[in-house]
Amino acid sequence: MIKLVYVITPRADISPEAFHDYWLNTHGPLVAKQAGALRLRKYVQSHLLDHPANEGMRAVRGMLPPVPGVTEVWWDSLEDLEAAYGTPEGAASAAILAEDEAKFIDFSRSQVFMTNEHVIFDHTGGRGPGPDAVKVTYLLSAKDGMSQADCHKTWLNDHGPLVASFADVLHMKKYVQSHTTAAESNARSQAAFGFMPPLDGITEVWIDSLEDMGKSGETEAGRAGSMALVEDERRFVEMGRSRCFLTREHLIFDHT
């Protein structure tokens, strides 16, 4: 499968409360109605969770502040996506969604890019994270002077196993890396809507609860693990152009 990642910045004339409400309760159902015509397989919204941990994760890395939310949409393949958008029904549905997005999203400060997922570990037994789960969302830009291919290689082959080694002490239940791909498709989206340039990927780490997340900082092993991961990230991440923050997932539909 292939996954579109949509890093959303709302329009300046919309309050945070109105943004989250409209995105979830109006735009979400509208996307669900277009799923058939656009061959959408799964659609998830991840809304920013207001929590002091966001500033802690940002400050220790020297990162940009959080964004209000991230959309993820899955297709069976890039070819399936392009085929759907090439039909009259798909084009009409895409126009409906774009018109609605313009009501609450600032395209010029948002980013859209296609990714391939890599599940590094899943300790949920296939059930997925619990109902109180929080998700650490990490929007990643490759280190200056490093190619995207080398960034992806280091991230997947070196950093992924390192994260897995600390899963227990950091109470991580699931860890997924999504690596940016399909450069031509990303460039077309950027040109059509005026999006910002795409990122190099997104990391997602699920923890069963805020309480469990807090336990990580209460032990020496947990604190050491957190710092080891931050230091390793510096090898392949340009911190000043990346972000790390907590979100709460909302599954709008899953037809997989």
Image (cartoon, rainbow, N blue to C red):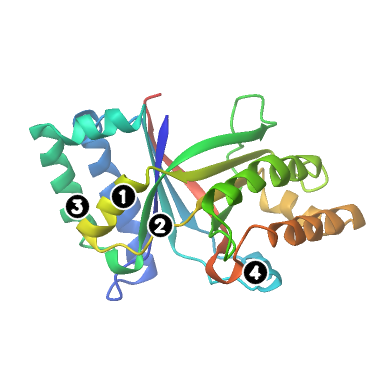
Task: Report the side of 224 relative to 152 (left or right).
Answer: right
The amino acid type of the residue labelled 1 equals Asn
- Tell me, yes or no, if residue 149 can be seen here: yes
Residue 52 is marked as 4
Q: Could you tell me which quadrant the N terminus lies in?
A: top left
Residue designated by label 2? 198
Is the Cβ of the residue at disc 4 closer than 8 Å to that at disc 1?
Answer: no
Task: Report the side of 231 relative to 62 (left or right).
Answer: right
Is the Cβ of the residue at disc 1 closer than 8 Å to that at disc 3?
Answer: no
Q: CA distance from mark 4 to mark 3?
A: 34 Å
How far from the left and from the top, in percent, is residue 193? 22, 59
Residue 129 is marked as none
SS for callout 4: loop
The amino acid type of the residue labelled 3 equals Ala
Q: Is residue 111 above or below residue 130?
A: below
Question: Which is more toward the observer, 130 or 145?
Answer: 145
Q: CA distance from mark 2 to mark 1?
A: 27 Å
**Upstream in the sequence, badge 3 or badge 2?**
3
How far from the left and from the top, in percent, is residue 55? 63, 71
Residue designated by label 3? 98
Which of discs 4 and 2 lies nearer the camera? The answer is 2
Residue designated by label 1? 25
How far from the left and from the top, in percent, is residue 44? 42, 42
Q: Residue at x 57, y 64 (%)?
A: 145
How far from the left and from the top, in percent, is residue 117? 51, 37
